[in-house]
Image (tube, rainbow, N blue to C red):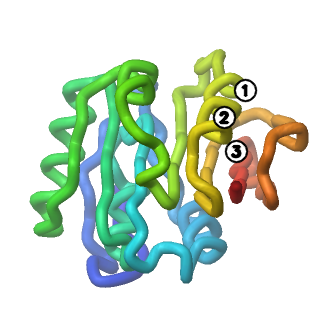
Amino acid sequence: MIRVIAGKHKGRKLAFLSDELTRPTQDRVKEAIFSALSSELIDAHVLDLFAGSGSVGIEALSRGAKKATFVDIRLDAINCIRHNLNLINEEAEVIKSDYQAFLNKVNLRKFDIIFVDPPYDFKYIDQLIKYLCDNIKDKAIIVFETSNVHDFEELNFSKIKRYKFRQKYVYIMRR
């Protein structure tokens, strides 16, 4: 079971995909992420890339984000996100797309916060984070979940925080 942990939709249960490709963000990881972002969320436009069930973007909406865009390549994920948005009576942009195709056609400068939680076997993490860093607006934030340690010091971030949760690392990087 996954749920919204705070904000106007606190306690609402959400549907999730139960397969080996999707791993919903655990409550304590979400709590840490959103505690670090607290004031940044108000009126923010967020992007949930590799969205899965959409629980992270939905948590952002619950806590005050003005707008959310959800992107996933899988139809079952898109259907799950739409179902969850209906459960909480929220509207958002939900896009079925490969991440590269989406990034090639969108202006990333419109997003204030970008959540990135790719599959465990995703091989292009460094290239993706560099691309995002090079194309986001000043003061934008990237929240990146991964199972491996990465070094993003050479990129043009003004601030990087790293959190460790068992076998998961979370990076919160500000441009």
Q: Nearer the viewer, mark 1 or mark 3?
A: 1
Q: Position of residue 134 (x, y in %)?
A: 66, 37
Q: Which residue is mark 1?
A: 126
Q: Residue at x 70, y 58 (%)?
A: 174
Q: On the image, numbered disc 2 is attached to which residue? A: 129
Please give the residue where the numbered disc 3 appears in the rendered image: 168
Q: First in sequence, mark 3 or 2: give its number.
A: 2
Does the residue at mark 2 contact the one at mark 1 (Cβ under 8 Å)?
yes
Callout 3 touching callout 2 (CB < 8 Å): no
Packing grade of label 3 (10 A; few <14, some 14-19, many >=20) is: some
Would you place residue 33 above or below residue 97 in this image? Answer: below
* Residue 172, image x, y percentages: 69, 57
Task: State the residue at coordinates (21%, 29%).
Answer: 76
> The disc labelled 2 sits on which kind of residue?
Ile
Provide the secondary structure element on which disc 3 rests.
Answer: strand
Rendered-image quadrant of the N terminus = bottom left
How far is disc 2 from disc 1 in space, using C-alphas? 5 Å
SS of the residue under disc 1: helix
Q: Are marks 1 and 3 in contact (CB under 8 Å)?
A: no
Pointer 1 local density, CA inside 10 Å: few below 14, some 14–19, many at least 20: few
Q: In the drawing, what numbered circle is on residue 38? A: none
> Which x, y percent locates residue 93?
22, 48
